[in-house]
Amino acid sequence: MKVACILGPGFEDSEFKQPYDALRDAGHEVTIVGLEAGQKLDGSKGNETATTDLAVADATPEDFDALLIPGGSSPDKLRAHDAPVAFVKAFFDQGKPVLAICHGPQLFLTAGTHRDHRLTAWKTIQVDLKLAGAKVVDEEVCVDRNLVTSRQPQDIPAFIRESLKLLEQVPARR
């Protein structure tokens, strides 16, 4: 499957790198989509760097089977721009798998996709989601139809396990 990983400055190192590697190890093609193509991004802990493959303005959701949204401050920085918000919303509108951890669901608030799913997120984001009318649970991983969410770096093993399980159930785009 082709997976878009939407990434901005200040991503949480492990929440990007571990799922990214696990998806690739499972045979999925992962494309890093950001505000600009070729942009070098540093993780918030300074342990990881990533270079975007494609600008979100040039990315077409129809070219991907699923979306990965790592946490950190990346989602908050991305949601300040229309193109990343529209990109995320398109995956929901098309019923494609969305895999988001920690602060990732901040993009759901701006895209208006938070009300239709049961989900989890970082503890402060859980409050924002609840206040905005979302069905929030405080669990290491929450799977609701096409959405997999987790709270924090300690939840990464469960997040990866359930994300890969969901992707196995979804037919790849032809």
Image (spheres, rainbow, N blue to C red):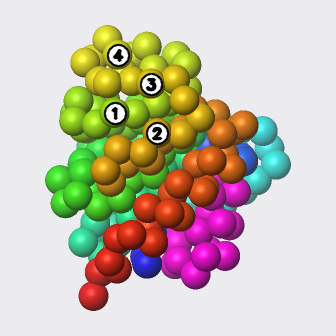
Of callouts 3 and 2, which one flags the residue occurring earlier in the amino acid sequence?
Answer: 3
Determine contact: label 2, label 1, CB under 8 Å: yes
In the picture, measured across the screen, residue 23 lies left or right of residue 88, that is right
For residue 84, the mark is none
Residue kind at label 1, given as amino acid type: Arg
Residue 30 highlighted magenta (yes or no) = yes
Q: Residue at x 59, y 69 (%)?
A: 23
Image position, residue 40 (x, y; %): 64, 58
**Disc 1 packing (10 Å; few <14; some 14–19; many ≥20):** some
Residues drawn in magenta? 16-34
Of callouts 2 and 4, which one flags the residue occurring earlier in the amino acid sequence?
Answer: 4
Identify the residue under disc 3. 137
For residue 118, the mark is 1
Determine contact: label 3, label 1, CB under 8 Å: yes
Determine contact: label 3, label 2, CB under 8 Å: yes
For residue 130, the mark is 4
Residue 49, above or below 79: below
- Examine the image and state in which quarter residue 141 appears: top right
Image position, residue 89 (x, y; %): 24, 48
The Cα atoms of the two marked residues, 3 and 2, are separated by: 8 Å
Of callouts 3 and 1, which one flags the residue occurring earlier in the amino acid sequence?
Answer: 1
Describe the element under mark 3 as helix, strand or loop.
loop
The Cα atoms of the two marked residues, 3 and 1, are separated by: 7 Å
Residue 103, above or below 88: above
Image quadrant in which the N terminus is located: bottom left
Q: Residue at x 35, y 44 (%)?
A: 144
Residue kind at label 3, given as amino acid type: Val
For residue 142, the mark is 2
Residue kind at label 4, given as amino acid type: Lys
Q: Residue at x 57, y 60 (%)?
A: 39
**Which mark is nearer the camera, 4 or 3?**
3
